[in-house]
Image (spheres, grey):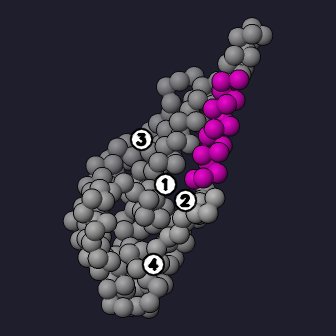
Amino acid sequence: MTILLAVARAIDAFSTAVGKLMWWLAAAMVLVGAYNVITRYLGNYLGMQLSANVYLEMQTYAFDLIFLLGAAYVLRSDAHVRVDIVYSRLSPRSRAWVDIVGTFVFLIPFCVFALYFCYGYVERSWSYLEQSPNPGGLPRYPIKAMMLVAFVMLIGQGLSEVIKNVAFLRGVPGYGRVVEAEPATDQTEGL
């Protein structure tokens, strides 16, 4: 179990590092978007073309990367969308079992299915080094390859969560995101 927990910690560290990088990419995306808007209106005012397709595509690619590569971090942080009507009423052990079964029944099969169908799409794009049809546009093949990377990362993070939940079920202290924690205190009490 020690080796598996070390693997889970390494996967968590990688997902966290990529997730934090996506935070910075989100800030860059906002700056590029602001640049696009400012230069478009300033260019119209001055009668010049200051904006270009490359900046619009950079903004779109940044969003794509945030969505794709941030998914594993969202799973690691337990921030994904879940219907908590039933789950929140379960005991921590039952939650661990639901997460383990859900990973093997839904998450991993979905990711394998996506990898299967994305592979040919990405391979075709790389075979002719697909470019944007827009003048001054960016290459498309690197961003398409990120689909494969994203689903592999998601499988890895899912397995990390399974390892931590199994450790929790086996009684290893400090593992599993479903461990019983002290109730959160309201920060606004007494104000």
Which-is-in-front pick, marks 1 and 4?
4
Left or right, 16 with reference to 1: right
Q: Name the residue under label 2.
A: 19
Q: Is mark 3 on a helix, strand or loop?
A: helix
Q: Which quadrant of the view contains residue 169? A: bottom left
Q: Which of 131 and 6 is in front in this view?
A: 6
Q: Which range of residues does the magenta coloring cover? A: 22-38
Q: Name the amino acid, label 3.
A: Ser
Q: Name the amino acid, label 1.
A: Leu
Q: How crowded is mark 2: few (under 14 residues within 10 Å), some or many (20 or more)?
A: many
In the rendered image, the vertical position of residue 86 relative to residue 169, given as above or below: above
Q: Can residue 143 be seen in this view?
A: no
Q: Distance of mark 2 from mark 3, alpha carbons?
A: 26 Å
Which-is-in-front pick, marks 2 and 4?
4
Q: Earlier in the sequence, mark 1 or mark 4?
A: 1
In the rendered image, the vertical position of residue 130 relative to residue 15, given as above or below: above
Q: Which quadrant of the view contains residue 30? A: top right
**Residue furthest out toward the right:** 46
In the rendered image, the vertical position of residue 59 relative to residue 163, given as above or below: above
The answer to whether mark 2 and mark 1 are in CB contact below 8 A is: yes
In the rendered image, the vertical position of residue 144 relative to residue 99, given as above or below: above
Q: Which of marks 1 and 3 is nearer the N terminus?
A: 1
Residue visible at 31% across and 66% down in the picture: 88
Q: Name the residue under label 3.
A: 125
Q: Earlier in the sequence, mark 2 or mark 3?
A: 2
Q: Which mark identifies residue 181?
A: 4
Q: Which of 134 and 129 is in front in this view?
A: 134
Q: Distance of mark 1 from mark 3, alpha carbons?
A: 19 Å
Q: Name the amino acid, label 2.
A: Gly
Residue visible at 66% across and 26% down in the picture: 36
